[in-house]
């Protein structure tokens, strides 16, 4: 196996890195595409080789729960995209988040989290971490003074999404990192909604960045995966725990992710353009009460977002001018976006959080999380912008 001559320079742009980075593990047959190593295990020539491996004299694969060459191509590509030393691939975004928490935290630790986040991450913190007596203080995403005040002697980590789900709040990460690091607190960012093309949290000082690779990284609504990136020292215990917990990715899905990643730069450029155009269209529409998109001046984090991010991707959250039924008429009226959970793929998806992620919450509790009856989350795909806007216009006519 030889290193690819096309290893991009560290100064290369996002698309060049997305296409070429990590594709070094070429076989002697000169196949251009990295193969799918669809194997559960790896054989040894003899017991001497096994001993050399066990005693660390040679580096190779052993068993498919610990490593796989197709995974490694994805991991190397993510290293180059995120500016990371190491990346570990997991079987889902939730496996990424839960394994990070379990690897990092000890019984009785404290964490600080932001109040707008993916429902299942909140559920894990509330229902599972609490069993380990891990406590959490919840703060507003923009409030770095609250972050400073929330840090206790046993605070181990500050965890946040950026942008958050569903209100797309953007964290002033350099400031949050400064505040957290002053007290020895690690900063973990779920960057699913940004993608490494729009924002690389490690370069703003975060210790760990994770993604639901199901979304923009895979990009085709056809796989579920997660990734965690950081320094080699930070990622080593997380990788070890993935091998124990077993939440790994099948090699075929890893290959689909590798293929999806090659078009990340192109897709994100399109999502950025369409997201902004759709947000502007909705903001000017009489049937829309309010739009949340970090690229609009009306968004509370517009200044931070434009300072830190290259674009704001394809998710636009908004309130319909009307009640639950009016909002249902809008979503049912959409002909291009599918009504489906998830985001970040080539197909536009639309959902009402009240009926989707939060359907089983008592009204008062979901209102605490800002989940109103008229809230819509739209993930703009890569369809033609004019077609999507025309479709939204006819669906709004039905409100
Ligand atoms: C911000 C964010 N993080 C994590 C997840 C979980 O990812 P997965 O569905 O790949 O487990 C999601 C899923 O929607 C998400 O929106």
Image: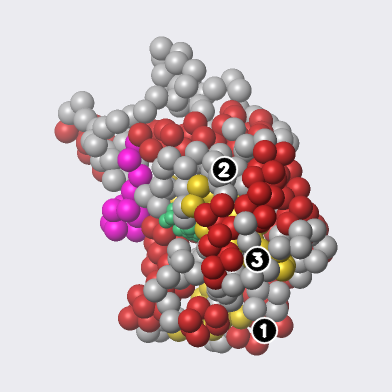
* Magenta stretch in the rendered image: 238-251
Dot 3 falls on a residue whose secondary structure is strand
Q: Is 241 contained in the magenta span? A: yes
> For the residue with label 3, is its CB less than 8 Å from the closest atom of ligand 1?
no
Q: Quadrant of residue 41?
A: top left
Colouring: secondary structure
Q: Quadrant of residue 325?
A: bottom right
262 vs 145: above or below: above
Graded by Cα atoms within 10 Å as few (under 14), some (14 to 19) or many (20 or more), the crowding at tag 1 reads: some
Instruction: Using the numbered discs, state the Cα–Cα distance from disc 2 to disc 3 in whole angstroms.
Output: 18 Å
Quadrant (top left/top right/bottom left/bottom right) for the N terminus: top left
Residue at the location (59% across, 28% down)? 20
Mark 3 or 1 closer to N-term?
1
Nearer the observer: mark 3 or 1; the answer is 3
Q: Main secondary structure of the magenta part?
A: helix
Quick check: 74 left or right of 95?
right
Q: Position of residue 177 (x, y in %)?
A: 67, 69
Graded by Cα atoms within 10 Å as few (under 14), some (14 to 19) or many (20 or more), the crowding at tag 2 reads: some
Dot 1 and dot 2 residues touching (CB under 8 Å): no
Q: Nearer the viewer, residue 236 or 164?
A: 164
Q: Nearer the viewer, residue 217 or 368?
A: 368
Mark drawn on residue 320: 3
Instruction: Using the numbered discs, state the Cα–Cα distance from disc 3 to disc 1 in whole angstroms.
Output: 32 Å
Q: Is 22 contained in the magenta span? A: no
Per the image, the residue denoted by label 1 is 146
Per the image, the residue denoted by label 2 is 336
Q: How many numbered marks appear?
A: 3
Quadrant (top left/top right/bottom left/bottom right) for the C terminus: bottom right
Quick check: 227 left or right of 142?
left
Mark 2 or 3 closer to N-term?
3
Instruction: Using the numbered discs, state the Cα–Cα distance from disc 1 to disc 2 in whole angstroms.
Output: 42 Å
Q: Position of residue 46 (x, y in %)?
A: 17, 28
């Amino acid at each position: 196996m030889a290193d690819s001559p096309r290893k991009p320079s560290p100064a290369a742009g996002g698309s060049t890195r997305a296409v070429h980075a990590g594709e070094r593990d070429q076989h002697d047959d000169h196949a251009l595409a990295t193969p799918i190593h669809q194997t559960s295990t790896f054989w040894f020539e003899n017991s001497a080789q096994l001993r050399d491996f066990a005693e660390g004299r040679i580096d190779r694969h052993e068993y498919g729960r610990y490593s796989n060459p197709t995974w490694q191509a994805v991991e190397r590509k993510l290293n180059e995209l995120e500016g990371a030393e190491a990346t570990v691939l997991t079987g889902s975004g939730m496996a990424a988040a839960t394994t990070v928490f379990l690897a990092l935290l000890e019984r009785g630790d404290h964490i600080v989290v932001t109040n707008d986040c993916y429902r299942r991450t909140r559920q894990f913190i509330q229902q599972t971490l609490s069993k380990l007596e891990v406590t959490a203080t919840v703060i507003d995403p923009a409030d770095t003074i609250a972050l400073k005040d929330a840090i206790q002697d046993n605070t181990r980590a500050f965890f946040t999404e950026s942008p958050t789900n569903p209100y797309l709040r953007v964290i002033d990460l350099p400031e949050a990192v400064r505040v957290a690091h002053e007290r020895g607190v690690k900063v973990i960012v779920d960057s699913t909604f940004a993608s490494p093309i729009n924002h690389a949290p490690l370069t703003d000082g975060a210790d760990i960045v994770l993604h639901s690779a199901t979304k923009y990284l895979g990009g085709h609504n056809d796989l579920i995966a997660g990734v965690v990136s950081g320094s080699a020292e930070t990622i080593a215990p997380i990788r070890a725990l993935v091998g124990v917990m077993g939440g790994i990715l099948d090699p075929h899905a890893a290959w689909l992710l590798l293929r999806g990643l090659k078009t990340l730069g192109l897709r994100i450029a399109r999502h950025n353009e369409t997201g902004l155009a759709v947000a502007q269209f909705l903001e000017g529409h009489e049937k829309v009460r309010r739009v949340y998109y970090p690229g609009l001046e009306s968004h509370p984090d517009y200044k931070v977002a434009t300072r830190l991010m290259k674009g704001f991707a394809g998710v636009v959250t908004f309130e319909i001018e009307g009640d639950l039924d009016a909002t249902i008429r809008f979503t049912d009226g959409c002909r291009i976006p599918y009504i489906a959970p998830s985001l970040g793929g080539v197909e536009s998806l639309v959902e009402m959080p009240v009926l989707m992620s939060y359907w089983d919450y008592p009204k008062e509790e979901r209102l605490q999380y800002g989940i109103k009856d008229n809230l819509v989350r739209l993930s703009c795909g890569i369809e033609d912008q004019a077609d999507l806007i025309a479709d939204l216009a006819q669906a709004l006519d039905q409100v």
